[in-house]
Image (tube, rainbow, N blue to C red):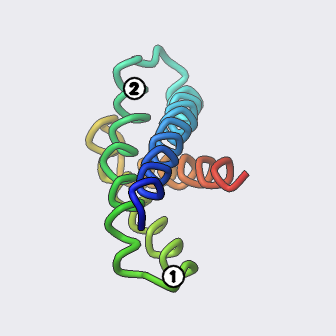
Amino acid sequence: MSNMDTFVYEIDFLSALALTVSIEAGVVYALLYYFNREKISIRNVLLGGVLPSFATLPYLWFILPIFFMGDHTLYISVGEFSVTLVEAFILQGVLQITFRRALVFSIVANFCSYIFGVF
């Protein structure tokens, strides 16, 4: 991979990170509002929308592809499953919610960001 290719990939990563954080923060806000119907802490929305993506997206983009070279379907399947699970644990700790609810949040947030990312 040339330096220019690497640069373009890194710019694509930063764009994906910004999009993912924006979408997932919005989803976390909407789900917190739906489930809590009370004053929502902006700290929780920011932490719940930013921290999981910052913790997992670099692995999904830079580490995981090394293990799944040539099998894009397996890479996406394993990657999205792993990210969703790890982000659920992060959301559980950050938002102080049950793991079941955190898993729902993570599934919905990752589904939305993946769909928007495909388009």
Q: Position of residue 20 (x, y in %)?
A: 52, 42
State the mark number for residue 44: none
Q: Nearer the viewer, residue 7 or 114?
A: 7
Residue 32 picture location, percent across and down: 50, 31
Number of marks in the image?
A: 2
Q: Is residue 11 above or below residue 95?
A: below
- Image position of 8 (left or right of 44): right
Describe residue 113's horizontal placement relative to residue 54 as left or right: right
Mark 2 is surrounded, within 10 Å at the Cα level, by few (under 14), some (14 to 19) or many (20 or more) other residues, namely some
Q: Quadrant of residue 63?
A: bottom left
At horizontal 59% and vertical 30% (from top left) the residue drawn is 30
Instruction: Give residue 112's position: percent from left, percent from top.
Output: 63, 48
Residues at marks 1 and 2, CA–CA distance in whole angstroms: 31 Å
Q: Residue at x 46, y 42 (%)?
A: 17
Q: Could you tell me which residue is drawn at 29 percent across and 36 percent down?
A: 94
Establish if 104 lies above or below 20.
Answer: below
The disc labelled 1 sits on which kind of residue?
Leu
- Mark closest to the chain's N terminus, 1 or 2: 2
Q: Is residue 3 left or right of residue 37?
A: left
Instruction: Determine which residue is flagged by label 1.
Output: 74
Rendered-image quadrant of the N terminus: bottom left
Q: Secondary structure at mark 1?
A: helix
Report the residue that reaches farthest toward the top. 39
Q: Position of residue 70 (x, y in %)?
A: 50, 85
Q: Determine which residue is flagged by label 2.
A: 46
Question: Relative to 15, does residue 34 appear above or below in the rendering?
Answer: above
**Image depth: mark 1 or mark 2 in front:** 1
Look at label 2 and name its amino acid.
Leu
For image coordinates 39% across by 26% down, the residue present is: 46
Relative side of 13 to 113, left or right: left
